[in-house]
Amino acid sequence: MSSWYALFFGIMGIEVKIRKGEPVERALRRLKKKLDREGVIKDVRGNRYFEKPSVSKRRRNKIAKFNNMLRHKWDN
């Protein structure tokens, strides 16, 4: 079963109930925010292709280095 199937048919346990009189667009917006907060979209995009362990370690180190740079910048 592919991940998009799981996203659209609620297998992953994320659901948004439409309130009485609420437009569908607003409910979709709430669903997108919920998916974004839980990191579902990021996980699905990350699993599109295999990433070698050395590449993932390099990517994590790059992110950590950037975060440390920002932390030092705002501490001073």
Image (cartoon, helix red, strand yellow):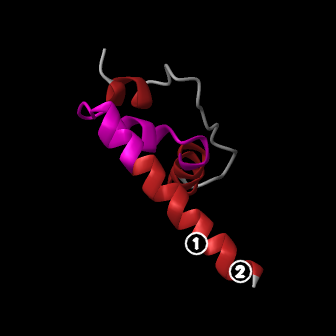
Determine whether the residue tagged by mark 2 lies in a helix, strand or loop.
helix
Determine whether the residue tagged by mark 1 lies in a helix, strand or loop.
helix
Q: Residue at x 50, y 24 (%)?
A: 10
Q: Residue at x 27, y 32 (%)?
A: 52
Q: Residue at x 61, y 38 (%)?
A: 16
Q: Residue at x 23, y 33 (%)?
A: 49
Residue type of the residue flagged with mark 1 = Met
7 drawn magenta: no
The part of the image, by quadrant, that contains residue 48 is: top left
Label placed on residue 69: 1
Q: How much space separates mark 1 and mark 2, taking CA atoms?
A: 9 Å
Q: Is residue 45 visible?
A: no
Q: Residues within 10 Å of mark 1 (few under 14, many from 20)?
A: few
Disc 1 or 2, which lies upstream in sequence? 1
Q: Nearer the viewer, residue 10 or 27?
A: 10
Q: Is residue 15 visible?
A: yes
Q: Which residues are magenta?
A: 36-58
- Farthest-out residue, right: 75
The image quadrant where one finds the C terminus is bottom right
In the rendered image, residue 24, in percent from the top left (x then y), is placed at 52, 51
49 drawn magenta: yes
The part of the image, by quadrant, that contains residue 70 is: bottom right
In the image: residue 35, left or right of residue 48: right
Q: Nearer the viewer, residue 51 or 65?
A: 65
Write down the residue under mark 2.
Answer: 74
The part of the image, by quadrant, that contains residue 23 is: bottom right
